[in-house]
Image: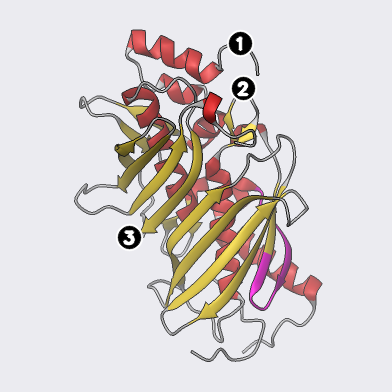
Amino acid sequence: MSTLPNPLMARLAEVRKSGDVAKLAEAIPYARWMRIAPENGTGELLTRMRYHDDLIGNTFLPAIHGGTLGAMLEMAAIFHLLWETETETVPKIVNITVDYLRSARPVDVIACAKVTKQGRRMVNVYAEAWQDDRAKPVATANAHFLIKSDDAPPSL
Amino acid sequence: MSSPLKDPDQRIVFFQQWFSDTIPHSKALGLKIIAVRRGFGSMQLDWREELVGNPETGVLAGGPLTALMDSCCGMSVATMLSEPKPFATLDLRIDYVRPATPGKAVIAEAECYRVTHSVAFTRAFAHHGDPKDPIAAAAGTFMLGTKGEVTRPQTIGAEVKP
């Protein structure tokens, strides 16, 4: 194990001082590439995936690719765990189940997350994604994350 | 209608064309079709720096694997339809059983093992070349006959009995 701080955890410490949560995404190459970033302008931590044409999964409807919705729900859960809990390591995803409720149009997708159950090693997170109308989610997810690296099995 | 695509190489070209033309996200990820036949699809995702989730380790984020599994399961569904019709992912579960090795391509293999009138059932594994040493496992269900245009290629095999 490296003794250097993880770039993401180092970024988290900076962001805790500055309050600029969007900077968390800058430490994750995939989040930058997908234009997924957290925001807390309303006082609630939300995660936004900015629309760009590479997100499309069906050019005829058109609709955003289901894989990208799963990906942004997972990122929303990770940002929530980093920001709202006392996790000391980057949460490691164990599994995720995504339910697709509506087709997602070619506009921004926003997600919120909440911890359903916090254990010592494992945390269960629920996340929900919507577009214009929060009452009409396009996808929801449940995911498990390992949050204590020293207790993690060698492979995870 | 067009005849079933009997030639494996022709099938790959055909499905890859469909992918590149109508699924920009699959193209953006650089998904390559390795094999496609009735009830089965296999795809490859090459490792790239911008797909990394943990900058300390270089391990791929979960997201690209989710998109790979969704796409591969969806392709296995397309091979089972007696006539092309639109369909959409209903749900998708992914177990990340071990981290992907940085720098290595990930191969997904999906099986569509049951098609009913309204729903298709799939399962998939992702690995680095040895299917007995999986990185991730998936179970996906798809709703058939959803709204929208047909974007999928013609079926490969015979009639499906609902």
Q: Which residue position holds label 3?
A: A101
Q: Is residue A18 above or below residue A106?
A: above
Q: Could you tell me if the residues under marks 1 and 2 are in contact, i.e. CB atoms within 8 Å?
A: yes
Question: Mark 3 — on which chain does it sit?
Answer: A
User: Magenta segment range?
Assistant: B30-41
Quarter-of-image position of residue B36: bottom right
- Checking the image for residue B118, the label placed there is none
Distance from Cα at disc 3 to Cα at disc 1: 42 Å
Q: Amino acid at mark 2?
A: Glu
At mark 3, the secondary structure is: loop
Q: Which residue position holds label 1?
A: A4
Disc 1 and disc 2 on one polypeptide chain? no
Distance from Cα at disc 1 to Cα at disc 2: 9 Å
Question: Mark 2 — on which chain does it sit?
Answer: B
Within 10 Å of disc 1 (Cα), the crowding (few <14, some 14-19, many 20+) is few
Q: Is residue B35 above or below residue B106?
A: below
- Measured as percent of width and height from the top left, residue B96 is found at 56, 46
- Measured as percent of width and height from the top left, residue A115 is found at 31, 37
Mark 3 vs 1, N-terminal side: 1
In front of the other: A77 or B16: A77
Q: Residue at x 35, y 46 (%)?
A: A107
Q: Is residue B40 magenta?
A: yes
In front of the other: B126 or A88: A88
Distance from Cα at disc 3 to Cα at disc 2: 35 Å
At mark 2, the secondary structure is: loop
